[in-house]
Amino acid sequence: MSSIELITRDVYLRHTAGDGSTSVREHRVWDADRFIAAQVAEAARLASAARDQDEPAAFRVEQITADQYRNERKAR
C-alpha cells in the first residue's frame, strides 16, 4: 500500500485594500504560481469594480519573503 504525500509550500503575500491599507498573510499552498496568479487576478477584479463605482481602487497583491512577513508582523 502506498501513501500519497502532499507537497505544500508556504507563500507570503502583502494584500493592499482599496483604501491603500495593507496586511501580510501566510498561505500554505500546493501550487504557488497558480495561487498567486489567482490572488493577483482577484485584486485586479476588485480594483476594476471599485473604479467603475468611483471608489478607492488601490487593490493589489504582491509576494514577499518570509523575513519581510515576519518583520511586518512584528511592526504591527
Image (cartoon, grey):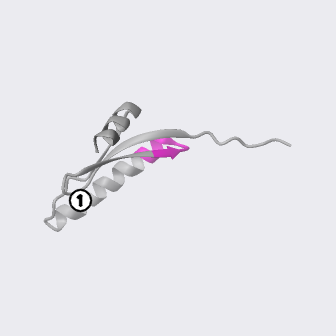
Residue 70, image x, y percentages: 37, 36
Residue 28, image x, y percentages: 51, 45
User: Of residues 24 and 3, which is closer to you in this image?
Assistant: 24
**Which residue is depicted at the point 18% across and 65% down?**
52
Residue assigned mark 1? 48
**Which residue is depicted at the point 33% across and 35% down?**
71
Q: Secondary structure at mark 1?
A: helix
Q: Quadrant of the C terminus?
A: top left
Q: Quadrant of the N terminus?
A: top right
Q: Amino acid at mark 1?
A: Ser
Residue farthest to the left, as pictured: 54
Above or below 11: residue 17: below
Residue farthest to the right, as pictured: 1
**Which residue is depicted at the point 57% across and 40% down?**
8
User: Of residues 76 and 57, which is closer to you in this image?
Assistant: 76
Q: Is residue 36 left or right of residue 30?
A: left
**Which residue is depicted at the point 28% across and 40% down?**
75
Question: In the rendered structure, does residue 60 fall within the stretch colored magenta?
Answer: no
Q: Which residues are magenta?
A: 27-36
Q: Is residue 4 left or right of residue 11?
A: right
Residue 21, image x, y percentages: 22, 52
**Quarter location, residue 50:** bottom left
In this rendering, the count of numbered labels is 1
CA neighbours of label 1 inside 10 A, class few (<14), some (14 to 19), many (20+): some
Above or below 21: residue 11: above
**Quarter location, residue 51:** bottom left
Residue 20, image x, y percentages: 19, 52
